[in-house]
Amino acid sequence: NGDDSSCKCNDPLIPSPRIGTKGWGKAHHLNKALIEATVNQFDTVDDVDDYSYGGTNGYDDFFGDDFYNLMKAGCDIAMVGDQFIEAMNGRSMGRNNTLFDPIVNVHKQYLTKSGGGNYDALPLGISGDSSPNLLWRLKHGEMPNYFDPQIWLVMIGYNDLTRWGCSEEIAVLGIMRVIEEIQFSWPDAKIVVSGILPVSPWKDGRLEGGTMKQNPTKKDLEELFSAGANHWWKEHGMIDLWPSIETVNKELEKFCEKQTKMFYFDAGDIFIKESDGKKYIKQDLMSG
């Protein structure tokens, strides 16, 4: 509505935690424990319990086999972001989820040395996070001064546009603020900025041209939307987000071109196909 009381978008320059969100604090604690374990080459969760923030008591369900594997590896690349990063650990809000097993397997194969990759990459994501949420996490334990990977990969911004309804300008500012924080702490590190991936709530994967009748029934929604479409999409289904995503990505690319030791990466083309002049997400890559 244009007023401060109704806008859900946080100030992009101010760190903002999600303290009241169930599981978020535990997921943040797990990320910090992963960093501690990686840096100190711990062998058991008990070692993390003795050393890390507040111990791991009460977090047994959050530590699966993947945690044990990651904690024994090093870290060449720190991958920070939202649900797209957290899924590489097989988790959502800190909870293990077998639906992410294929993503975990790809991560192991290409982004761990033990799995045959050239680098050890540590995923540090939390589902649903915006740029201000990530900024808070970095300033509160997920970027300690003894954690010094060669490369930082930043993948954030999707939830700013969707969950919180931020404008393209605010989304870009939030991502740049995260980048600035990493640059300030690690001026010699290389930073890879990932473009926001294409997303669609529609069953056919369309990225533009979606329409929805006024006052749709539950059956209308079921016919139009994929099972994975969340409440935001169902409320704002007539809005095409792809143009906004393209706008943000273009600004990020231009920003990176002007920087040293910073690289823009866009995997969007992997997911997109064109048909009759329109763009769609490839059906075999859609979930839900």
Image (cartoon, grey):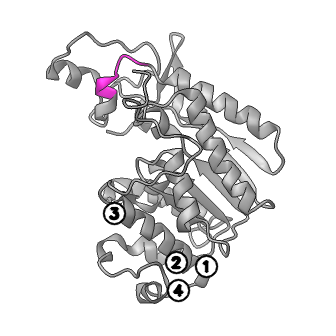
Name above or below for residue 73 compared with residue 207: below
The picture places residue 36, in percent across and down from the top left corner, at 54, 78
Assess whether residue 17 is covered by the magenta stretch: no
Asked whether disc 1 touches disc 2, contact meaning CB atoms under 8 Å apart, the reply is no
Which residue bears the numbered disc 2? 71
Assess whether residue 235 is covered by the magenta stretch: yes
Q: Residue at x 54, y 21 (%)?
A: 243
Which amino acid type is shown beneath numbered disc 3?
Asn
Please say whether residue 117 is visible from this viewpoint: yes
Query: From which residue to which does the magenta span run?
Result: 233-239
Asked whether disc 4 touches disc 3, contact meaning CB atoms under 8 Å apart, the reply is no
CA distance separating discs 4 and 2:
6 Å
Please say whether residue 109 is visible from this viewpoint: no
**Mark 4 secondary-structure assignment:** loop
Which residue bears the numbered disc 4? 42
**Mark 2 secondary-structure assignment:** helix
Which amino acid type is shown beneath numbered disc 2?
Met
CA distance separating discs 3 and 2:
16 Å
**Mark 1 secondary-structure assignment:** helix
Which circle's residue, 4 or 3, is located before the other in the chain?
4
Name above or below for residue 88 compared with residue 282: below
Residue 96: mark in rendering: 3
Name above or below for residue 96 compared with residue 134: below
Q: 264 or 113: nearer the eye? A: 264
Q: Residue at x 52, y 59 (%)?
A: 137
Which amino acid type is shown beneath numbered disc 1?
Val
Residue 39: mark in rendering: 1
The picture places residue 48, in percent across and down from the top left corner, at 46, 84
Which circle's residue, 1 or 3, is located before the other in the chain?
1
CA distance separating discs 4 and 3:
21 Å
